[in-house]
Structures are given as C-alpha cells and as structure tokens.
Amino acid sequence: MDPIVIIGSGLAGYNVARELRKLDKVVPLTILSADSAHFYSKPMLSSSISKAPEAIAMNTAEQMSAQLGATVRANIHVTAIEPERHALHLYHETVSYSKLVLALGADQIKLALEGNAAERVMTVNDLTDYTQFRAAIAGKHAITVIGGGLIGCEFANDLTSGGFKVSVVDIAPQPLPRLLPPEGAAMLKRKLAALGVDWHLGTSVAAIDSDGTALSIALVNGDKLMADVVLSAVGLRPRIALAQAAGLAINRGIVVDRSLQTSAADVYALGDCAEVAGLVMPFVMPIMHAARALAATLAGKPTLLTYPAMPVLVKTPACPTIVSPPAANAAGTWSVTADEESVKSLFFDAAGKLLGFALNGKATAERAALVQQLPPVLAG
C-alpha cells in the first residue's frame, strides 16, 4: 500500500500527522522536509531572541519519526508532482502516494532595494534563518526592522528588550495597519516607543549601502538610518510554485475546498500555502483546526473545515494586544473606549452585532467574553 505523503514539516505538516495517528495507528505515513525536519514553534522565532536555536527546536527528525510511527526524510526537495500518476519526483527518485498533503508554508516577501548592501537584508522564516540572524546580531547594537506588521512589531519588542537599539520602518502611517484601528495602533506605538523603539512610519526604504562595516539605510522621505543589521518582515507569500507546475488551481494560495482538497484527486493542502474559501490565514489557530479536519478526512471520515472566531495574540509584552479582525468585506463601524492603560475597539454591524475586536493593554482581559459573541469565520 502506498503511503500518505506529507510535504512539509512545519506546524501544519506535523500536526496533520499527529492528528492522523490519533485516528489511524497503522496507515503508512511519510513526511518529506526541505530542511532538517526539526519540530519547533515557528511563532517563537520572533519573540525569543535570547534563546539558542537548540532551545527552540523541541524534537529532531528521528524523534518525530519515532513519535509518529512515520518515515521522516529531512533535506529532501520535491521537484515535481504528477497527480494523475499519484507520484512525486525527487532529484533521483520517484515516490508514489495514496494521498498527498501539501503543507508547504510561505516565503518571506523580499523587497527590491537599491544600494551596494541590499543583499545583506535578512529575513527569518525558519530555524535556519533564525540561527543565521542570531549569529549576525551577536555583539552588534543597532538593528533596523523593515515592516511594522505583526512579525515586525514582535521582533521590535523582543530585540529592544534584549538591549538592541531598534528602528522600525513601514510605509503605513501606523503599526499593524491590517489588524488594528488607529487608536489601538497609537497605544502600541507609544508603548514600544517607551521601550526604546524608534518609529519611521509613512515612508519606506529606498537603498541600503555599506562602508564595509555599518549599514546606511536611505528612506524615501530623505531620512537616513545607521544600523549593523537590517531585518525585513514585510509579509508572507504562499508557496504555490510546486502546485502550480502540477496544474493545480491557484489563486493567492493553493485553492482548496472545505475538505481541504485541491483541484486534483487525493491531493490536499493546508496552512500558510492554502486558500480556503478565499481565505489565506497564516496563524496558528487556523492551522490547528485545519489539521484536525484533514486528519479525519484522511482517516476515512470526510470532514468539512469550520473556523470559529480565532483571536490573534500579538507577542508584544510592552503592550499586550489581541485582535479578532472583522471580515475584510464586513460593513460596520468601530466603537472605541480608551484610557492610559487600555484601548478596547469593538466593530459592530448596523444591527449592533459584534463582528470583531481589537484589545490593547488591560483590555485584553475581556478577550474570552468577547469571543463568545463573535460569529464563526467559516461556518459549518
């Protein structure tokens, strides 16, 4: 019997395997990983800079293989998929599958920048990147972060708390522009500034040059910053190339239905690479719900994915922040109450129904009560 094959050993891939093993102890299972196949929590990479890579990695590939009763192959690159043959091509090998799960993840978006040191801009998207970044900042002082979104703010908080001088550059007029209304963003900006973060908003990086040691960062507004290291955290792009080359339906991500099946029979996708009902949700909770639903389907019990309300925790201890944003096309208005230590932003439709919220500071204590009032993101 050909195995179920999972491509990807991140949170999505390993959690599908774990959930499947709860339901089926014996089905052959193979996990192919383009990296070392260590299991770790990727969200820790932007909030644990004091931790050595080996402290973040919780299990090796060998340990995961033993836990899951699966074949785990590290440093394996899948070059092509042939859905009609139920086959994968590696460099010098063909692997057959009964069912295939694409848990490919996403890549950091890389900016096209000018300057003789543009290639020195770093990104952190996996444990290898994290290892290289920690080595680069060892003994350094000043770090510029490009991007004031969720990951950029988490890095800014973590690095500043670790003693680094941090500047954040973002083209938006506020931090977390896709998640926070202005009042909540203002509090986050203020609290991180009090910690030591230097904000450069409403502008972008034009060029990065080096005199051999320090980096000179020219901003579009004419300002210049000096840094030892530049980290880019401007967003993620789903990895779709492998699926696209195989003829699968692609939009922003790999298009799947609520069974997480792609346009090809017996081929599924989840996590950062997948687009479910028009949604690409690169957060932990959607992955966990998708892993449980897909595992049931793989075990022979077809299951449709549902998403409850899933608040996002922003790991910025200087300003605790929890967001459950309304749907992108939701009609309504924000109602905001604020004081020195909290901002509570509630999004209501015309009938007074709560569709989303953003909580900063002490207002985060209201999370549980508010979640109960929210509609599901994807209903059954």
Image (cartoon, helix red, strand yellow):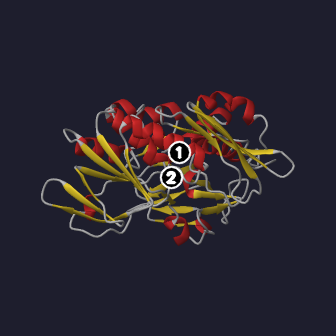
Tell me what residue is drawn at x 54 percent, y 50 percent: 6
**x, y (%) of residue 70?**
51, 39
Residue in front for this viewpoint, 172 or 263: 172
Tell me what residue is drawn at x 41 percent, y 50 percent: 125
Residue in front for this viewpoint, 207 or 245: 207
* Residue denoted by label 2: 174
Vertical arrangement, residue 75 with respect to residue 222, above or below: above
CB under 8 Å between callouts 2 and 1?
A: yes
Tell me what residue is drawn at x 34 percent, y 44 percent: 130
Question: Which label is found at residue 108?
Answer: none
Place residue 268 in its image quadrant: bottom right
Mark 1, residues whose alpha carbon is within 10 Å: few (<14), some, or many (≥20)?
some
SS for dot 2: loop
Does residue 87 appear in this view? Answer: yes
SS for dot 1: helix
Q: What kind of residue is marked 2?
A: Gln
**x, y (%) of residue 75?**
37, 50
Q: In this view, does 125 lie to the left or right of 180?
A: left
* Residue denoted by label 1: 186
**x, y (%) of residue 1?**
60, 49
Q: What kind of residue is marked 1?
A: Ala
| Residue ranking furthest to the right | 351
| Residue ranking furthest to the front | 339
Q: In this view, does 57 lie to the left or right of 308?
A: left
| Residue ranking furthest to the left | 212
Alpha carbon separation for disc pair 2 and 1: 7 Å
Does residue 45 appear in this view? Answer: no
**x, y (%) of residue 124?**
37, 49
Vertical arrangement, residue 285 with respect to residue 203, above or below: above
Mark 2, residues whose alpha carbon is within 10 Å: few (<14), some, or many (≥20)?
many
- Number of dots carrying numbers: 2
